[in-house]
Amino acid sequence: EMVMTQSPATLSVSPGERATLSCRASQSVSSNVAWYQQKPGQAPRLLIYGASTRATGIPARFSGSGSGTEFTLTISSLQSEDFAIYYCQQYNNWPLYTFGQGTKLEIK
Amino acid sequence: EVQLVESGGGLVKPGGSLRLSCAASGFTFSNAWMSWVRQAPGKGLEWVGRIKSNIDGGTTDYAAPVKGRFTISRDDSKNTLYLQITSLKTEDSAVYYCATDRGYGDCWGQGTLVTVSS
């Protein structure tokens, strides 16, 4: 079964610093990975698709990279509004869409 | 502006049924593939199922935990997506989101809460 594993579960970073979030697929998903941001009480918001393409309106400080089984979301200079939970998702293999368990990005 | 608005959630007893709706606006709904995703309280995101556009066959796919109990349908004349849920279990308690589906979900509704409890 397709599994997406995110690390770390919680990441503590100071505002202005860089945050690096990881996502590993249990089998190759090519570049068919998306990243979402979710704040408490809100719906997920698409940040990145195709592993590295920013969605409309997403600031340039968000970047994605990777292919195959290893993927990274980088936030270059954390703003206060960036502290949230981040999910990766694959859309290459069955079951059709599989999410990681999430990484909580918290203020250090 | 693209907008998705879910409704129909509520408190239901185990074994009961519910129909959720998702009203779409701001885009050509009939051309869109649509998905439902759920999130149990304090948990992560779980894909529930998808429906293709009628132009692409209108077929549906479901995640294993809900297959046979959940049915996704659409009414393009009303720009509305549906999720019929039967034989509800306590583990189905969650916020249910609809989303446009390009493989990834580029637009999401605000969600509707389903609570299954006796």
Image: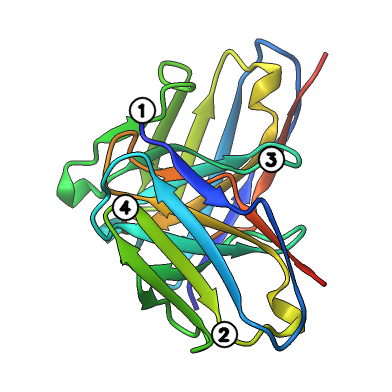
Q: Quadrant of the N terminus of chain A?
A: top left
Residue topped by disc 1: A1
Going by the numbered disc 1, the residue's amino acid type is Glu
Amino acid type at circle 3 is Lys
Query: Disc 2, disc 3: CB below 8 Å?
Result: no
Label 4 to label 2: alpha-carbon separation: 33 Å
Tell me the chain of label 3: B
Q: Mark 4: which secondary structure?
A: loop
Vertical arrangement, residue B16 with respect to residue A29, above or below: above
Identity of the amino acid at label 2?
A: Ser
Mark 3 surroundings within 10 Å by alpha-carbon count, few (fewer than 14), some (14 through 19), many (20 or more) = few
Q: Position of residue B94 (x, y in %)?
A: 68, 36
Chain under disc 4:
B
Per the model, the C-alpha gap separating discs 1 and 3 is: 20 Å
Check if mark 1's residue and mark 2's residue have beta carbons within 8 Å. Answer: no
Residue A9 screen position, x and y as percent: 66, 50
